[in-house]
């Protein structure tokens, strides 16, 4: 995908900071979890990502929660992450367009290797320098930025966030209708531009 000169000039002038969530936005976490679940129990009733209707995986019908806990806390889960189509290119394009881009992700506190494996996956798919652009936090409202691209339906924390939430569309967040959405990475430029233009006008 090429970044249009008009966009580049505009973004360079404002040098916006874009925060990008990892699971369900940069990486296909749900599919990696499903692979782990099937390793633990080949008969596990996994739900394909496009059919999942709850952000919280524990709502899967007929699922054994103990197996879900084991899969979520298993070593290697976050090493097996594959990028969501277009995500890696989009992040590099954002940088090229003059944005300051950071990954912003919450490590699973019960999974002892989650944080280090997230760093490893970032290094594998984006390059080692992106580890220095990765913010692991349990409260994203404490992080400064102009836009946060995240698949979580509602993000709360200790502060009123300064960023605007651009919801990365997934089957489990389609009921949210009062936020700007990014349906696929192809559309990042216009979605981000719209938010920045509204912020500037406010
Ligand atoms: Mg996420």
Image (cartoon, rainbow, N blue to C red):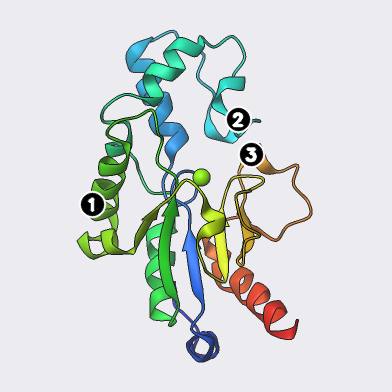
Residue behind mark 2: 52
**Residue at disc 1, secondary structure:** helix
| Viewer-side residue, 3 vs 75 | 75
Residue behind mark 1: 124
The alpha-carbon separation of the residues under discs 2 and 1 comes to 27 Å
Q: Residue at x 66, y 46 (%)?
A: 154
Q: Residue at x 50, y 84 (%)?
A: 4
Q: Residue furthest right?
A: 178
Query: Quick check: 151 above or below 193?
Result: above
Where in the figure is residue 138, as x and y percent of width and height?
47, 45
Where in the figure is residue 12, as x and y percent of width and height?
47, 88
Tell me, for residue 171, which label it has, or none.
3
Instruction: Kindly tell me whether residue 171 is visible in this rendering.
Output: yes
Q: Residue at x 54, y 85 (%)?
A: 7
> Left or right: 163 with respect to 12?
right
Q: Earlier in the sequence, mark 2 or mark 1?
A: 2
Query: Quick check: 22 above or below 142?
Result: above
């Amino acid at each position: 995908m090429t970044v249009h000169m008009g966009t580049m000039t505009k973004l360079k002038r404002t040098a916006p900071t874009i925060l990008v969530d990892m699971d369900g936005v940069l990486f296909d976490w749900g599919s990696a979890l499903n692979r782990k679940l099937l390793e633990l129990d080949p008969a596990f009733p996994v739900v394909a990502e496009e059919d999942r209707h709850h952000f919280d995986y524990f709502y899967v019908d007929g699922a054994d929660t103990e197996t879900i806990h084991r899969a979520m806390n298993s070593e290697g889960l976050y090493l097996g992450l594959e990028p969501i189509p277009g995500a890696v290119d989009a992040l590099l394009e954002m940088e090229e367009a003059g944005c300051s881009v950071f990954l912003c992700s919450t490590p699973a506190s019960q999974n002892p290797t989650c944080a280090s494996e997230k760093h490893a996956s970032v290094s594998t798919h984006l390059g080692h320098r992106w580890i220095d652009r990765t913010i692991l936090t349990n409260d994203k409202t404490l992080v400064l930025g102009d836009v946060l691209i995240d698949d979580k339906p509602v993000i709360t924390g200790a502060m009123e966030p300064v960023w605007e939430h651009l919801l990365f569309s997934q089957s489990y967040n389609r009921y949210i209708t009062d936020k700007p959405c990014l349906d696929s990475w192809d559309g990042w430029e216009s979605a981000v531009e719209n938010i920045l233009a509204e912020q500037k006008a406010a």
